[in-house]
Amino acid sequence: MSLQYSDPEIYQIIEKEILRQQRNIELIASENYVSKAVLEAQGSVLTNKYAEGYPNKRYYGGCDYADEVENIAIARAKLLFGSNYVNVQPHSGSSANMAAYRVLLRPGDKVLGMALDHGGHLTHGHPFSFSGMDYQFIPYFVNRETELLDYDDLEAQAIVHRPRLIVAGASSYSREIDFRRIKMIADMVDAFFMVDMAHIAGLVAAGLHQNPVPYADIVTSTTHKTLRGPRGGLILCDSKELIMQINRTVFPGIQGGPLMHIIAAKAVCFKEALNDQFKLYQQQVIRNAKTLSNSLQKLGYYIVSGGTENHLFTVNVKKSLGITGKKAEEILDLVGITCNKNTVPFDDEKPLYTSGIRLGTPAITSRGFKENEMKEIARLIDQALKNSTDNAFLKQLRREVYALTDKFPVYEG
Ligand code: PLP
């Protein structure tokens, strides 16, 4: 029986979510719209299959097709990122990071990671995350004036602390990260080097961001952000010895059976990312982020670090308008523009309030928005934030948002 009849309650919620995704302008930098092919693979009967282990070494029978799917996913990921070895089983970016840490570290080891309020991720040492509980994370920062990653400070900290691992990668840093430079610092102090490229994986795949694979001992990623695949994780490395440890750590170390439907959807996503069209898409993602950031800057908004070189940027709304990121997020939500509050470097607001909002272009670019739409979105954001007490005006803006998104169906047909 179809979902509509077997569970109308859930069916209707999903219908409402389809409408929300269609009508709203989605500016959450870590989200995207997957292709219908990815959705189809993810919703396939492969969800029924247990396949603990790895291709040709499974703990269950009936894994012939699971093996085929996983081998294809691995081969495509190797090709896409130029990596010798790949594990496609992590259920998420966080599990990929957990596995990588467990391979490279012992509990209590020192790790240098980008400060969370400067752009790093929870799994880079937040005290409530396993990472901050199990290891001794020491943050590195952006420069107070330029708001750019301070490689000299990172080097100085590495020399003082002699960490066992340096982690690079971020959730809200709008500039290209120089992995080569960080690798040199890691070598200087004899530390391992790991890159979490979750946010920029799509840009890396398209050759539009320095590829960390030649520099890092282990590269982790999610597959659902710029890479535009299903929600999931990925681990890459160039050493046979390390991949053997990674594989053992992912299963049986921290996970049970792999999600074969998700691995099939990852394979589909990697095939799409190997296509020339994907490069054009990522080029447009960056052009759109630059146009949106420049347009807001022209309207008087303070953009952290003065601009962007990738798919996202942070607006310091407190400096621009004297409101918190939380307030800005709520106002924009009223007009159908979805984004998230975000700390800015050296933020004096609490994490639940923040001084900034993070804006990203992967999702809106997937639905076909280009530079003209970015200028229009900047105007809509500006008008909403400056007229937040005028309900009738906000309603009018919401109609304008819907008129814009109506012209760009997320899923046609
Ligand atoms: N690493 C980075 C840099 C991220 O931005 C994220 C998610 O936002 C993750 C890891 C975690 O990914 P997941 O939500 O799949 O656990």
Image (tube, grey):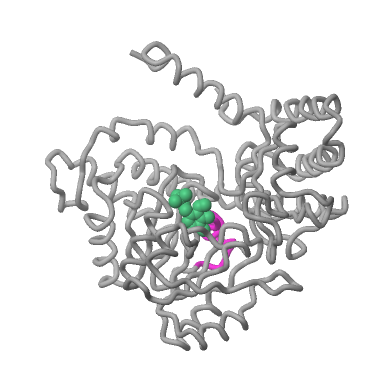
Which corner quadrant of the image does residue 240 belong to?
bottom left
Q: Image check: 272 left or right of 384? A: left
- Based on the picture, tell me whether residue 204 belongs to the magenta stretch: yes
Above or below: residue 213 compared with residue 315 = below
Nearest to the observer: residue 43 or residue 188? 188
Query: Residue 126, position in %: x, y?
Result: 49, 61
Q: Residue furthest top?
A: 5
Above or below: residue 373 compared with residue 45 = below
Query: Residue 174, position in %: x, y?
Result: 66, 61
Which corner quadrant of the image does residue 130 belong to?
bottom left
Magenta stretch secondary structure, dominant: loop
Above or below: residue 305 compared with residue 311 = below
Magenta-drawn segment: 199-211
Picture residue at 23% right of the left edge, 61% below the top: 248
Query: Residue 44, position in %: x, y?
Result: 33, 31
Pick the quarter of the image with the N terminus.
top left
